[in-house]
């Protein structure tokens, strides 16, 4: 599979790396519980700075820990840091570490390790190096205290570093990193790699030097590439935790008494319904030769008129855990910016487009249903649409290599903030496949992130989002879908971080 990160990739496989902060429970007791999580693909790395795709992030966050995390209420929670204080002018931050945190090898986590980790991310090629891009200097005060200074105001520094790429690794160990799993990049997470060989099972044991190591005896990731095999592994008891995506949602869940519940086949399973993380959109490839005669102003007009004609609420009713999605960010983030009225007529579109246009979709049952529900909107605008269904790999290839005309895709999205989302539209972002780049987006983002007053900063973000919504012409949003976890262990919570990377949260497993 062609894996691209922080950009649209495929139906049912997310792009922005989902990050797991694993905590195996809070209650006392012997470590007797073995956790098994079914994932789609084997990880290519567990080095935080090298991680740029979903399943590597899922596994990597078991082994690594950040200074802070963000809970479901959007609150900053300490992990390795005892406290982080950002100066009132946004030009510096003082990081105080918890005493007693240890890496896998038993050595203590120190401020020198924090300096090395953030500096390494800053010098990396990872798209999320933007979270530390304004760090100017480090000053080690003591083994447990570090002062970071910035080149420009960075009032949301604490939120920015709550992602896997900013996890703290032992200074110097990255120099001996070896692929594919970088086991020599020593972390300080809740779990220690025990067996990370190329294959289908990856086993971890608890790190007793982690602040809340909990009571589970082991954690194992088992690779099940097909959605049906993942569901079968959960139903049989081979796996006891599963994140539901795409076809799995429809096949594993049902609405009963107004609640989202597991189907009876998955008896004793708990459904954790969290903030939205999956979005669906129609991607338009304006670079396709068949659209060469459609001028830019007509492209924008088409997107607006098409968007206004989609029966989003009807779509959402037919899809499990979905909600209408009408702008560049889901309704749960910002109120959708109103699209300006368009004077374009349906007939003008029919004359601009070829006699037949192709809508590409994945070939699973829910995707086929969605495509059939969207097709009438094309016809209402005078376009004759041909539906073509391909396997997921074919869809990924077509979208990433821009071989499609129209394609229905799913992708991950950020929730609390919008900057990670807007990076998709940045002309300097090499991972963007959202159609035409939008000049000026980076400048607007940089100005906005420097605003000290939280209310003024959020207002400025809304203005940037509205600008992107009015100018983008290669993407038509359909709906957003909530993050769903199916578990036979008690799950303590689900949260999403601010940097464009949905997070499943720690798992609070109790006996």
Image (cartoon, helix red, strand yellow):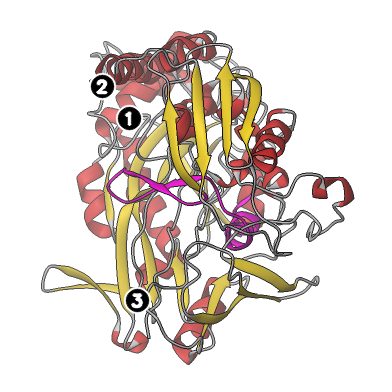
Mark 3 to mark 2: distance in Å?
A: 39 Å
Q: Position of residue 401 (x, y in %)?
A: 70, 37
Which callout, 2 or 1, points at the residue further toward the start of the chain? Answer: 1
Mark 1 to mark 3: distance in Å?
A: 35 Å
Query: In this figure, which residue is indicated by the disc labeled 1?
Result: 327
Which callout, 3 or 2, points at the residue further toward the start of the chain? Answer: 2
Please state, as top left, top right, bottom left or bottom right, where the C terminus lies in the image: bottom left
Disc 1 secondary structure class: loop
Mark carried by residue 337: 2
Up-down relation of residue 49 to residue 63 (above or below): above
* In this rendering, the label closer to the viewer, 1 or 3: 3
Q: CB under 8 Å between callouts 2 and 1? A: yes
Q: Residues in magenta?
A: 53-80
Residue 44 is left or right of residue 501, and the answer is right
Quarter of image, res 121: top right
Up-down relation of residue 134 to residue 316 (above or below): above
Disc 3 secondary structure class: loop
Q: Residues within 10 Å of mark 3 (few under 14, many from 20)?
A: some
In front of the other: 333 or 187: 187
């Amino acid at each position: 599979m062609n894996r691209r990160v922080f950009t649209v990739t495929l139906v049912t496989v997310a792009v922005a790396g989902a990050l797991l902060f694993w905590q195996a429970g809070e209650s006392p007791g012997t470590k007797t519980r073995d956790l098994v999580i079914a994932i789609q693909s084997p990880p290519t790395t567990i080095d935080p700075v090298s991680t740029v795709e979903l399943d590597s992030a899922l596994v990597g966050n078991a082994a690594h820990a950040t200074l802070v995390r963000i809970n479901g209420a959007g609150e900053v929670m300490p992990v390795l840091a005892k406290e982080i204080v950002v100066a009132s002018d946004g030009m510096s931050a003082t990081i105080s570490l918890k005493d007693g945190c240890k890496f896998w090898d038993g050595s203590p986590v120190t401020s020198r390790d924090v300096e090395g980790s953030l500096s390494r991310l800053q010098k990396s090629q990872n798209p999320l190096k933007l979270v530390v891009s304004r760090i100017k200097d480090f000053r080690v005060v003591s083994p447990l205290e570090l002062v970071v200074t910035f080149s420009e105001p960075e009032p949301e520094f604490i939120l920015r570093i709550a992602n896997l790429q900013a996890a703290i690794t032992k200074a110097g160990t990255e120099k001996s990193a070896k692929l594919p799993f970088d086991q020599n990049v020593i972390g300080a997470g809740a779990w220690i790699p025990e067996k990370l060989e190329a294959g289908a099972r990856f086993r971890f044991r608890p790190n007793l030097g982690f602040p809340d190591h909990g009571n589970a005896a082991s954690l194992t990731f088992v690779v099940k590439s097909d959605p049906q095999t993942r569901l079968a592994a959960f139903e049989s008891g081979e796996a006891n935790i599963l994140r539901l995506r795409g076809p799995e949602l429809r096949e594993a869940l049902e609405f009963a008494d107004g609640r989202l519940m597991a189907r009876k086949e998955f008896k004793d399973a708990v459904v954790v319904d969290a903030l939205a993380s999956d979005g669906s959109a129609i991607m338009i490839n304006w670079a396709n030769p068949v659209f060469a005669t459609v001028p830019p102003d007509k492209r924008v007009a088409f997107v607006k008129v098409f968007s206004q004609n989609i029966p989003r609420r009807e779509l959402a009713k037919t899809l499990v855990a979905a909600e209408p999605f009408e702008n560049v960010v889901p309704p749960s983030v910002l109120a959708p910016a109103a699209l300006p009225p368009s004077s374009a007529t349906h007939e003008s579109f029919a004359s601009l487009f070829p006699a037949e246009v192709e809508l590409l979709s994945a070939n699973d049952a829910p995707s086929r249903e969605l495509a059939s529900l969207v097709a009438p909107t094309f016809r209402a605008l005078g376009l004759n649409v041909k539906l073509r269904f391909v396997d997921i790999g074919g869809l990924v290839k077509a979208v990433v290599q821009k071989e499609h005309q129209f394609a229905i895709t799913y992708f991950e999205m950020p929730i609390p903030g919008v900057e990670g989302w807007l990076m998709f539209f940045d002309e300097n972002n090499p991972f963007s496949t959202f159609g035409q780049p939008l000049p000026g987006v980076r400048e607007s983002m940089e100005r906005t992130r420097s605003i000290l007053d939280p209310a003024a900063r959020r207002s400025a973000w809304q203005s940037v989002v509205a600008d992107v919504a009015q100018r983008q012409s290669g993407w038509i949003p359909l709906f957003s879908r909530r993050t769903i976890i199916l578990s036979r262990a008690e799950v303590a919570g689900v949260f999403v971080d601010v940097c464009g990377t949905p997070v499943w949260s720690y798992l609070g497993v109790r006996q």
